[in-house]
Amino acid sequence: MNMASKLFLLLFLCIALMALYHALFPLPAYVVFTRFFALSGFFLLCVVLMIGPLATIWPNRFMPLLESRRTIGIAAFVFIFMHFLLAFLLYYGLQASMLFSTPLMALALAATIALAVLALLSSDYFVRMLGFANWKNIQLLAYPVFLIALVHFLVSARGLFVPVGQSVFVNAAEIFAIAMGTATIVLQMVGFIVKRGKLQKQVQQPAR
């Protein structure tokens, strides 16, 4: 089994465990589905943004996963779009005027549209049509989308300990999401430093 297959299997298991966790959580079904799609989409978005710096830091091990980012990115869009659609239906009654009712809702709409654009342009056809450099610049939209998703998650989070009736539950899904978001930011910073160091070495080599 190659690295990409192992990664997809791991992601499938993580999503399945998240679905099982939410299914067992004593909340109304519409809340469970909305949160499951949101946290699963955020998780996949984090994975997409973690692969790049991992390939920079440990190229021999993680470079084969770079091609997998497109498929995972499309999956992230599907989950996040389902979350947006459910929230728009259940909490806003599909009223278009509510899309800009709050800055947070407007940002969520912008992030969803940006993800839709990235998913649409993810094929090799658009890479050839736009040129790799232009296509790569468009893909940078994933970073502000991540930041918006992170802020949206932090504002909407129920907390690490959730009271339901007479019981208090540890919110393992949100703890996992916080860990993934933190790891994504740290890896991006480390990857930037390592990449910058490699570029400086390449510039200095001809002068020797």
Image: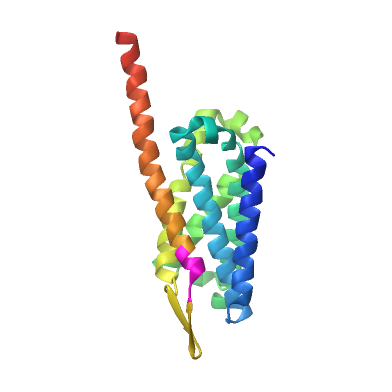
Q: From the viewer's side, name the closer residue of 134 and 71.
A: 71
Seen at 59% across and 74% down, the residue is 32
Question: Is the residue 80 above or below the residue 137 in the image?
Answer: below
x and y, in percent, of residue 85 in the image: 60, 66
From this viewpoint, which residue is outermost toward the right? 1
Residue 33: tell me if it is visible.
no
From this viewpoint, which residue is outermost toward the bottom? 166
Residue 144: tell me if it is visible.
yes
Instruction: State the predominant SS element of the stretch in magenta.
Output: helix
Is 173 one of the magenta-colored residues?
yes
x and y, in percent, of residue 170 in the image: 47, 75
x and y, in percent, of residue 88 in the image: 56, 71
The range drawn in magenta is: 170-175
Q: From the viewer's side, name the closer residue of 104 and 207.
A: 207
Seen at 54% across and 77% down, the residue is 91
From this viewpoint, which residue is outermost toward the front? 1
> For the C terminus, which image quadrant?
top left
Question: Is the residue 67 above or below the residue 197 in the image?
Answer: below
Q: From the viewer's side, name the closer residue of 76 and 65.
A: 65
Seen at 38% across and 31% down, the residue is 195
Q: Is residue 10 left or right of residue 196?
A: right
